[in-house]
Structure formats: structure tokens, C-alpha cells
Image: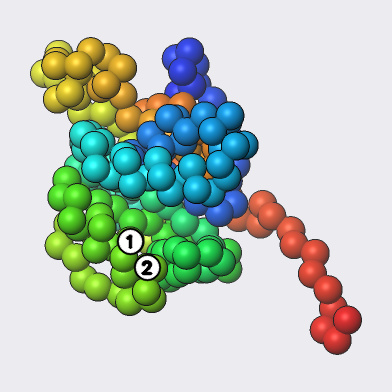
């Protein structure tokens, strides 16, 4: 993950489980370490529901490609790229088709700003159902590039910035549950970057 930190400097880091841009990254931005230490996962779920009810969906531009090099574009309100097939908690198989054995990122791309669509997708993951939801797509990608929309003068902008100031116009980035920074950002795959040590069969 390549991104811009809060000081405006280019930064990068590896991730193994999931990376998000949009409302889930905003969650980690708002979720303080003190609150997490005092309340644990309860703080996460409480803040998630609070943001779901109040967060102003901010759109950002995405260009992505698969292993063949074919490139596509989208205007999204939320993006989550996942590397594992099963989260092991209430989210279960949050992104069908994701796997550490796969050579590409498996991404949930949300084109809609509908809160009910978000809720339907998460509810489906909770009960183990896969629903086709208008405005939410599952895509396999080898590269994902995200940035804020631009004005005619070339300056990154956001429809919220004019009303709430530059802080409200930012779109944030997280990886493996850690808040990182903001857009622009780029996600890629690095082959054979991770080695796992597991017990031998029968031990």
C-alpha cells in the first residue's frame, strides 16, 4: 500500500489481511487507542454503527487492472481489498473468492452511497448469504490506484470540502486495522512476499 501520510509525505507499508479506503478507514481514524483499550471490540462495533448512520459518503476515483493489464475506472464511496477467505469472527467470509493463494487482490467496490446497500452486504456476510446488491461489485485486481476527483484546474477536491473545509474533504486509508493516512493511494501485489510456518501433518 502506497499512500500519503497526514503530513503530506509519501509513505508505504505491506499488509497481509485487508486494506480499506473510505468509511472503514475513517472508522480507524476516529477510533482512539484509549477507547480501544478500554472497550475492545465493543468500541469497534459501536463506532462502526455510529459512522454508518452519520458518515457523509465521499466519492473518490479508482483505476484498477487485472493480471492481463486491462484497466477500468470507477467512482466509489468505499473500497476494501482482502487477502484472506475467512475472518474468523462475525464477518465470516466477508469477501468471497479472497485467498492468500490467489495472485490478485479481491476487492469490494461500492459505487453506491446508499446506507441500506452497505447494510445488506454486511448482513449477508454475517449470516453467510451472498446477495447481488446493486452498486456493490466484487472484483479481482492486480493493481488499484485511488485519488480524489479533480477540479478543472487539476486540484484535488471533494464535494464536502466546499461546505465543511479541507478536513472533511479527505478520504482516509487503513491496512490490517491500522490507520495509515489519506489519498492518493496505490495497492499492488508482491509475489512470494510472505512465508508461513505450519505444523507438519499428524503433529
Q: Is residue 85 left or right of residue 62?
A: right
CA gap between label 1 and label 2 equals 5 Å
- The residue at 50%/48% (across/down) is 42
Q: Residue at x 52, y 29 (%)?
A: 32
Q: Secondary structure at mark 2?
A: helix
Packing grade of label 1 (10 A; few <14, some 14-19, many >=20) is some
Where is mark 1, residue-wise?
Answer: 122
Q: Count all numbered tags in the image, as a single digit.
A: 2
* Residue, far bottom: 202
Q: Which circle marks residue 125 in the picture?
A: 2
Q: Is residue 53 above or below residue 126?
A: above
For the rendered model, the colour scheme is: rainbow
Q: Is residue 76 above or below residue 127?
A: above
172 left or right of 12? Answer: left
Q: Are marks 1 and 2 in contact (CB under 8 Å)?
A: yes
Residue at image point 58% right, 29% down = 34
- Mark number, residue 186: none
The quarter of the image holding the C terminus is: bottom right
Q: Is residue 108 above or below residue 186?
A: below
Amino acid at each position: 500500500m502506497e499512500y500519503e501520510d497526514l503530513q503530506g509525505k509519501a509513505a508505504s507499508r505491506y499488509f497481509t489481511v485487508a486494506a480499506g479506503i473510505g468509511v472503514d478507514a475513517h472508522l480507524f481514524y476516529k477510533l482512539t487507542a484509549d477507547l480501544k483499550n478500554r472497550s475492545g471490540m465493543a468500541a469497534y462495533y459501536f463506532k462502526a454503527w455510529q459512522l454508518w448512520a452519520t458518515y457523509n459518503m465521499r466519492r473518490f476515483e479508482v483505476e484498477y487492472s487485472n493480471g492481463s493489464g486491462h484497466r477500468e475506472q470507477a467512482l466509489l464511496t468505499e473500497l476494501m481489498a482482502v487477502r484472506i477467505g475467512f475472518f474468523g469472527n462475525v464477518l465470516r467470509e466477508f469477501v468471497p473468492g479472497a485467498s492468500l493463494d490467489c495472485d490478485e487482490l479481491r476487492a469490494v467496490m461500492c459505487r453506491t452511497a446508499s446506507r441500506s446497500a452497505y447494510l445488506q452486504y454486511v448482513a449477508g456476510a454475517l449470516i453467510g448469504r451472498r446477495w447481488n446488491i446493486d452498486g456493490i461489485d466484487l472484483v479481482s485486481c492486480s493493481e488499484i490506484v485511488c485519488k480524489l476527483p479533480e477540479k478543472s484546474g487539476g486540484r484535488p477536491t471533494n464535494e464536502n470540502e466546499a461546505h465543511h473545509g479541507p478536513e472533511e474533504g479527505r478520504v482516509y486509508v487503513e491496512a490490517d486495522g491500522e490507520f495509515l493516512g489519506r489519498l492518493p493511494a496505490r495497492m499492488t501485489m508482491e509475489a512470494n512476499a510472505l512465508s508461513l510456518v505450519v505444523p507438519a501433518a499428524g503433529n
